[in-house]
Image (cartoon, rainbow, N blue to C red):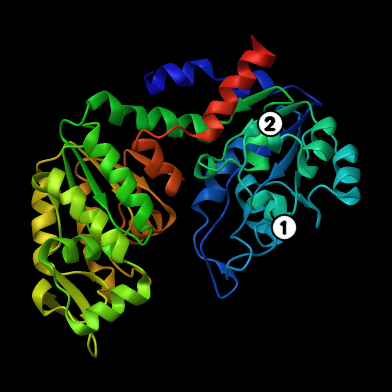
Amino acid sequence: MLLNDVIDQLVNIERCLKKDKTLFIRIDINSPIVNGKIVDDFRIRAHAFTLRLVSDAGARAVVLAHQGRPGQDDFTSLELHKPYLEKHLERPVKFVDDVAGPEARRQIKELRGGEILLLENVRMLSEEVIERVPEAQAETFLVRKLAPLGDYFVFDGFAVAHRSQPSVVGFPPVMPSCMGPVFEKELRALSTVFEKRGKGVTLVAGGAKIPDTLKAMEQLLKNGLVERAAVGGLVGFVFAVAKYGIVSAPLKQVIEKGGYLPYIERARQILSKYGSQVQTPIDFAVNQNGRIDVDVYSLTQAPLDIGRSTVLLFREVIEHSEIVIFSGPMGYIEDDKFAVGTAELLRSAANKRLILGGGHTILAAEKAGVIDKAYHVSTGGRAFIQTIGGEEMPAVKVLLTSAKKFWT
């Protein structure tokens, strides 16, 4: 089934915008945090549009979202996000330090039309990080306690659409549900990739999510949805090792310590099938009292960026493209010295129909000054990669089921 056909079967948020109705809205405002501060609020800006729609309609908005994952440095309270939401909404946002307990339920009941209540980080509930089928998630504490207090569920968090967690798939089986505008915009933009059937479509993939990227690349190439792929970041490092067999003693330690060995074998298999379509780095930038470029055979440490020769090579690939899907930076963009490769390629891709995906990619595009030139800026990271790879999204599947159950 074509993506546009799927979208047409989902229920639009307009049908849920009714005065004095309570809407549970799952958004994704998971943001990069450095030293306790949000350093990029792109997702918050995107979802402010949705919350403004609901508020302007006179409905009561109850916001479910997460930040980080238990045990990670960026796992924190959503109270940090409240002022950012208020800034972009230009109206007050209530916050409750509770997800589905007595205080959260009390404040939900007391909401008035047009008001917005941000619940605490849903991942404060241990059940939220467990993935199960929607029917099981509908029986969780979160859904059992909150669903009776609402009229509609709005799923707008494309960046978490690949998760089969309670706040994503638990509500649609038990209450009328619809897709939000951010989610719909994402699906419609990505449908253009499928319509091209690979002709003139190039994937520029980087970052550190190696297994996800390898899986998506293989799917895209297998299904003929991209014509070429250029790989950088840690993904590019893995492909370079697989292609050139660079296994010096220092690199062997890097590979073993990073757990990259299984990925190298997977990359080797992809190259054996689609080698002529995959462009790998031929040099890398490393830190030796500053940035220096070394060719693949001279590499003795983990790379921090693609080298200048690789930039020229990748730019040539981009030049012969019509659509460029850019997912994941080419290097360690937190350090300007190693953001060069990413910035150069983004500037080249901005002359094409550029689709950006992933938080770090967006941050790099903003720094490179090309964010406004992009055809589409996706709020998703892994969800973006999986969708363009043709994988079924749990959120989409359960919304289709809910539409047939409650709206037909």
Frontmost of labels 2 and 1 is: 2
Please tell me which residue is depicted at 61% across the width and 68% down the height of the picture.
Answer: 71
Compare marks 2 and 1 and give the one earlier in the sequence: 1
Mark 2 sits on what residue? 135
User: In this view of the protein, which residue sits in the foreground, 36 or 265?
Assistant: 265
Q: Which amino acid lies under the numbered mark 2 shown in the image of this protein?
A: Glu
Q: Which amino acid lies under the numbered mark 1 shown in the image of this protein?
A: Met
Residue 134, numbered label: none
Give the crowd class for mark 2: few <14, some 14-19, many >=20 residues within 10 Å: some
- The secondary structure type at the circle numbered 2 is helix
Please tell me which residue is depicted at 66% across the width and 25% down the height of the picture.
Answer: 177
Please tell me which residue is depicted at 32% across the width and 44% down the height of the picture.
Answer: 216
As drawn, 151 above or below 183:
above
Query: Splitting the image into 4 quarters, where does residue 179 fall?
Result: top right
Residue 152 % position (x, y): 73, 26
Report the quarter where the N terminus lies. Answer: top left
Query: Splitting the image into 4 quarters, where does residue 338 fall?
Result: bottom left
Q: Are marks 2 and 1 in contact (CB under 8 Å)?
A: no
Mark 1 sits on what residue? 124
Please tell me which residue is depicted at 59% across the width and 25% down the height of the picture.
Answer: 399
